Image (spheres, helix red, strand yellow):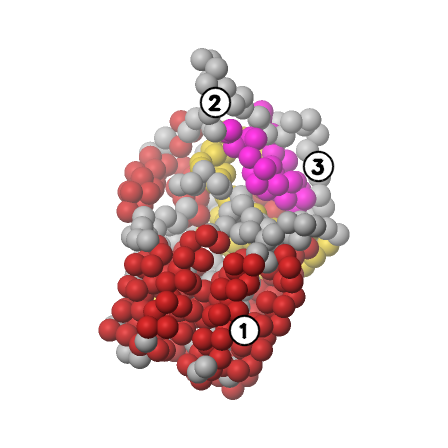
Amino acid sequence: MIRAETSDLAEPVPRPSNRHASGSRRRPGFGADTSFRAAVREMEAVGLRVGAQPHAGSAPYGVLSGRTGSRFFLLPLRPRAVSAGALALVQPVRWMPRAIKDVASVGARLGLAPLLPHKVHVSGVGDLARMADAGARHGAFLTGTPGPHRKLSVQLMDDAGHIRAYAKVSLVPAVQVLLQREAQMLRLLAAMDLRSAWLPCVLRSEVRGDTAILATDAVRTPAARCLIDLDALHLDFLQELAARTASSWARSGASLLDEWNARLAQLGDALAPPWRQRLDRAMAVLAAEPPLIASRGLAHGDFTPVNCFRQDSRLCVFDWEYAGAAYPADHDLICLLDAVARLGGDAPAARAQALEQRLTGELGRSRNEANRRLIAFHCVQALRGAERQPSQADAELNWSGADEAARTLDALLARASAS
C-alpha cells in the first residue's frame, strides 16, 4: 500500500459559487459535491495529490459528470492514447449517452480532450499504477455513486492507453468488508475456472490503517460495450455458475425465508410500519410455497448490464462484492431484466407485469414461479437497501428507490393474490 500523503492545499478542489452573476441559484459544481470530495480524500489516502492548480509532477484531468450529476469521472487529458483509453471507464447504457461517448472518443483521439471546461490537477498517479504491478503508468478515476457503499474506482493504463488493471479504494469500514469479500469470491471462482465467462484475477487486496484497496487485472478494451438486453452469453454464464456451485451454495426456500425474516427482525423499529407490513405480507406469500424460490447456487448479487460486457465473443463479469448464497432462484436473471426494463421508463406496476410476462413467455417459468421470484427479488433488494443505511436515533430508515420499490412490491403482491 502506498503511504497516504495529504495534499498541502487548503482547498484541494474548487468550490464554485452557487449563484450566477444575475443572482439566480444553480446546482453546485463538482468541487462542492460531498461524494467528489470524499473521493479526493480516498485518492490522497493512496498517495495522490489533487489540486485546482498545477503543481510539481501533476497532470491535468478533465472532470465529467454522470447523467444524473451524482458521480464524476476524472479523465487524463494527455497523452492522446491514454485520454482516449480512459473513456472506457464511462459505460453508458442509454443510446444518447452512448452516442455522446462515441463523439468524445473521436475528440480524444484528435487531441481535443484538453478543451474540457472543468479540470483538476493530479500527481502521484504513476506510483499508484505501479502498485498493481501490471505494467500501468496512468489512471482514470470514478468517484462512485453516492450512498453508504460509495467507493473510488480507478482504471489503470499503459502509455498506449491499454487497460492493464482496475482498483477500488475505500476509507469506509462497511465498504472495506465488501472489498475483502470480493477478493475472497474472485479467488474462489478462479479455482473453478469457469468456461462461460472471464472473471477478474486479484492482483492486490489489503487494508492498511484506515484504507482498503483491491486491484484486479483486466481484459477490457476501449471498444468493449455493455450488453443492454438479455443475451445467450448471460444465460450460459448463469447456468454454469449455478451448476458449478450448487453443491456448496444452493439453499432451500425455507432456509432463505428464515434468514430474511431474521434480517427483517434486526431492523427493528427503524423500518417504517408500511414497509414492515409490506415485507411481512411478502414473507407470508413466499412461505406458502418455499420451493418456488429455492436457489440453485451462488449468485453474483448485482448482475446488471454495467457489471458485465462482451469481449471477443465472451462475457466478462466483475464487481462481485455482493456475491453470496442468500438470494432466491433467478435473482441474477431478474436483476439484469429489471435493470434493462428500467431503461424504458415504465411505471412500477407496468414494469412488474412486463417482467412476469417475460419470465413466463420467453424464459419458461410458470406464472407462480415468476411472481414469487420477483417478490423475493424485491424483498432482498429492500432488505439490502435498508441495511446499508446508517442507523439514526428516532429516524425511520429510507433508501434510494424505496418509494418505487414499494409500488413494485405492492403490484406484485396484488398479482399474487389474484393468481
Vertical placement of residue 46 versus 184, above or below: above
In the picture, the quarter occupied by the C terminus is bottom left
In three-dimensional space, the C-alpha distance between marks 2 and 1, rounded to whole angstroms, equals 46 Å
Left/right placement of residue 66 relative to residue 322 reads left
* Dot 2 alpha-carbon crowd within 10 angstroms: few under 14, some 14 to 19, many 20 or more: few
- Give the amino acid type for the residue marked by disc 2 in the picture: Arg
Q: Quadrant of residue 51?
A: top right
Residue 186 in view in this figure: yes
Query: Which residue in the protein does label 2 denote?
Result: 25
Report helix, strand or loop for mark 1: loop
Q: Which residues are magenta?
A: 28-54
Query: Which residue in the protein does label 1 denote?
Result: 326
**Residue at x-position 51% and y-position 29%:** 28
Query: Which residue in the protein does label 3 denote?
Result: 6
In three-dimensional space, the C-alpha distance between marks 3 and 2, rounded to whole angstroms, equals 33 Å
In three-dimensional space, the C-alpha distance between marks 3 and 1, rounded to whole angstroms, equals 40 Å
